[in-house]
Image (cartoon, rainbow, N blue to C red):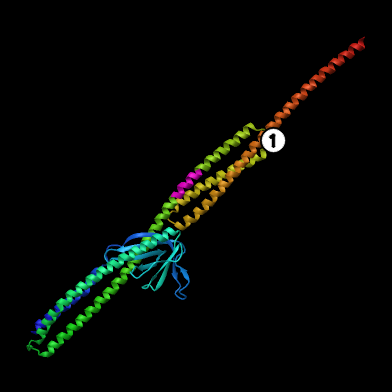
Amino acid sequence: MKPEELTRALKESSLLQKKTLICPVRMFPLHREREQPIFSTRAHVFQIDPATKRNWIPASKHAVTVSFFYDANRHAYRILSVGGTKAIINSTVSPNMTFTKTSQKFGQWADSRANTVYGLGFATEQQLHQFAERFKEVKEAVRLAREKSQDKMELSTAALSIAAPQFSQDLSDELQSPPVMCVNGPEDKLFRSQSADITLSSEKERIKKMLSEGSICEMNLEAELFTLQDSNAKLVAALHEANANVEQWKKQLAVYQEETDRLRDQVADLEAHGGQGPSDMLKDELTQSLEELENLLKAKDEEIRILQSKKSNFHELEQEREEAIHRLQELEMRNVELERRVQSTEQTLVSALEDRERAENEVQRVAQILDIKIFDLNDLRQSLVKLINK
C-alpha cells in the first residue's frame, strides 16, 4: 500500500471513529423536547439522615408537589419535586427500585445514584396508594424499555461480530502486502502514523469533554426550568386565590352594610315610638356602636383597595388576608352583640309602655273614685245647708 493510500485510510478510520463517538450526542440534544408530567400529587418530603441512616430529615417545611416526568427521547422516567429555588427530589426511576409503604400514609424508596433514601408523607391513604401504583407502573415501563434496548444492543453486537472477520482479513492482507519505498523513506511513514494517532486521541478527548459539559449544562437548565415552572404555578394560584378572597370579602361587606342599615332603621323606629326613659342610655350606646361599625366598614373598604394594589406580593397578601379574616370575625361577633342589645332594648321599651299603660289606667280609676267622692261630699254639703236653714 502506498503512503498516500495509508494516510487516506487512517483519515477515513479517524472520521469513522468520530462519527461513532458523536452518535451519542444526538441522543441528548440540548434543545430536545421538554419532559412531560404524567402524574402529580402533594406530600411532605423527607430524606434519611446520612449520619445515622435511621432518622428522617424534613426536606420541605410544608407539603410540596411531587411529579413523575417522562422523557420520550431517552425513554426515561424521573420523580421531581421543587421546593423554593432548588430541587429537593431528582430521582431517575430504575428497574431495581422499590417503593415501600411503611405506614398508612408514609412510603419510601432508595436511590442508589443519589446515595439517599426518600420518604413521602401523604395527607390520605388514598394518595399513598395512587403514588405506589404509579411508581409500580413506571418501574415496569422502565424495565420493558431497558429490555428492548438490550435486545437492540445484542443485535448490533451480532452484526458487528459478523462484519469484524472480513474487516480483519482485509486489514491483514493490506499489512502483508510488500511495502513500497517512498521518497522520504520509512521515517516519513512512521511520522505520519504517529501524527494520525495523536490527532485521533485528541479528538476523542475533545468529544468526551464536550459530552460531559453538555450533560452538566443540560441538567442545570432542566433544574432551572422546573424551578421556574413551579414558581410560576405558585404565583398564578396565589393570584387566583387572592382574587377569589377579595370578591368574597366584598360580598361579606355588602351583607354587613345591609345589616347596619337594618339596625339603624330599628334604632330610628325605637327612638320615634319610645319615650324618654331608662332605655335612652342603651340607645346612645347602640348608636355609638353603629357608628363604630360604619367606621370599620369604611376601613375594610380601604383595606380591600390596598389589597388589590398589592396582589404581586404573595406573602404580604396572605398576612393581610389573615388579618382581614380576623377582623371580619370580630365584626361578626360585634353584630351579634348589637342584635342582642337591640332585642334587649325592644323588650325594655315594651315593658316600659306596658307600665305606662297600667299607670294611666290606675290614674283614671283613681280620678273616677275621686269624682264619686266629690259628688257625695257636695250632696252632704247641700243637706247640711238645708238642715241649718231649717
Q: Residue placed at 22% from the left, 75% from the top? A: 21
The span picked out in magenta is: 244-253
Please state which of residues 216 and 158 is positioned toward the viewer in this rendering: 158
Near-viewer residue (136 or 62):
136
Q: Does residue 289 appear to the left or right of 121 in the view shown? A: right
**With respect to residue 223, does 253 lie above or below?**
above
- Does 148 lie within the magenta span? no
- The residue shown at (92%, 12%) is 388
Q: Is residue 82 left or right of 262 when viewed as pictured?
A: left
The quadrant of the rendering that contains the N terminus is bottom left
Residue tagged 1: 277
- Whether the magenta-drawn stretch holds residue 251 is answered as yes
* Residue 66 visible in this rendered orientation of the protein: no
Q: Judging from the image, what secondary structure is the residue with disc 1 in? A: loop
Q: Is residue 106 above or below residue 197?
A: above
In the rendered image, residue 305, in percent from the top left (x then y), is placed at 47, 49
In which quadrant will I find the C terminus?
top right
Position of residue 390 relative to residue 32, above or below, is above
Q: Residues within 10 Å of mark 1 (few under 14, many from 20)?
A: few
- Residue 317 percent across, percent down from the top left: 47, 55
Q: Residue furthest top?
A: 390
Residue 204 in picture, x, y percent from top left: 23, 78
Number of numbered markers: 1
- Could one spot residue 363 in this view of the protein? yes
Please identify the quarter of the rendering in which residue 347 is found.
Answer: top right
Q: Quadrant of residue 131?
A: bottom left
Q: Position of residue 40 (x, y in %)?
A: 37, 59
* Left or right of 135, for residue 310: right
SS assignment for the magenta stretch, majority: helix
Q: Amino acid at mark 1?
A: Gly
Viewer-nearest residue: 250 or 347 = 347
